[in-house]
């Protein structure tokens, strides 16, 4: 049962970024706080939905490992390890036009939106859990290959970027890494890109 809840939670947050996951791609020991996802394909519009003007032509993630301390989500770190990310991107100029129109459209939708109170409570509960996880999250991302393809009149020009390691850690106000967060009002994260 816990596996089903964890799977549902993961799909809720990953569905806009990753193609549907089948059982052969997922290994889970939810009671021990461990999830492993392998050989994932990225959604073509994963970046576009955030108004980042690139369409993913091909994108894969070799491995995602999640370790989370169920009993101490609010104080102990959740560890996220991601490796072997390969992405081929194409510039999407239409996104820049949509980005200019979006504030006006969201203002109109905001006036007409009517949300059920029970679904709002459920969303708040999930958001509270996710906030606790994020406050104490540690991430280690390695082996990232990004290729940008720019079509020209006669051919396509490719520009590549390799990022060996990215780490994300919680830090205090003096930028020192802290192992546990104890419900501070402000969460500070340090993102470090190494050996680029």
Image: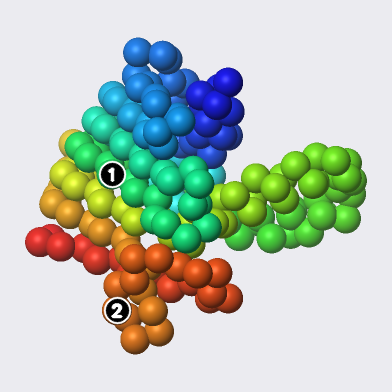
Q: Position of residue 138 (x, y in %)?
A: 34, 56
Q: Residue furthest bottom?
A: 174
Number of marks in picture: 2
Mark 2, secondary structure of its residue? loop
- Which of the two discs, 1 and 2, labels the residue nearer the N terminus? 1
Q: Nearer the viewer, residue 23 or 56?
A: 23
- For image coordinates 35% across by 13% down, the residue present is 24
Residue 185 found in image quarter? bottom right
Q: Is residue 101 above or below residue 57?
A: below
Quadrant including the C terminus: bottom left
On the image, numbered disc 2 is attached to which residue? 176
Q: Residues within 10 Å of mark 2 (few under 14, many from 20)?
A: few
For the residues marked 1 and 2, what is the alpha-carbon distance in whole angstroms?
Answer: 21 Å
Q: Nearer the viewer, residue 47 or 151?
A: 47
- Please state if 164 lies on the left or on the right of 36 as rendered: left
Q: Position of residue 115 (x, y in %)?
A: 86, 44
- Res 94 seen here: no
Mark 1, secondary structure of its residue? strand
Q: Residues within 10 Å of mark 1 (few under 14, many from 20)?
A: some
Q: Is residue 149 above or below residue 96?
A: above
On the image, numbered disc 1 is attached to which residue? 81
- For image coordinates 82% across by 55% down, the residue present is 110
Quadrant including the N terminus: top right
- For image coordinates 16% across by 44% down, the residue present is 143
């Amino acid at each position: 049962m816990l596996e089903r809840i964890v799977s549902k939670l993961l799909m809720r947050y990953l569905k806009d970024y990753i193609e549907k996951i089948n059982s052969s791609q997922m290994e889970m020991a939810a009671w021990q706080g461990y999830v492993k996802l392998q050989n994932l394909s990225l959604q073509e519009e994963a970046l576009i939905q955030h108004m980042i003007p690139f369409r993913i032509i091909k994108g894969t993630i070799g491995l995602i490992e999640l370790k989370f301390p169920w009993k101490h989500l609010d104080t102990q770190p959740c560890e996220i390890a991601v490796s072997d990310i390969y992405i081929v991107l194409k510039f999407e100029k239409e996104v820049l036009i949509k980005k200019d129109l979006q504030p006006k459209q969201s203002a109109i939708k905001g006036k007409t939106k009517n949300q059920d109170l029970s679904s709002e409570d459920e969303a708040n509960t999930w958001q509270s859990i996710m906030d606790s996880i994020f406050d104490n999250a540690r991430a280690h991302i390695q082996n990232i290959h990004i290729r940008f393809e720019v079509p020209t009149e006669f051919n396509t020009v490719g520009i590549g970027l390799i990022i060996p390691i990215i780490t994300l850690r919680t830090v205090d106000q003096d930028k020192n890494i802290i192992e546990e967060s104890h419900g501070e009002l402000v969460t500070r994260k340090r993102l470090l890109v190494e050996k680029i």
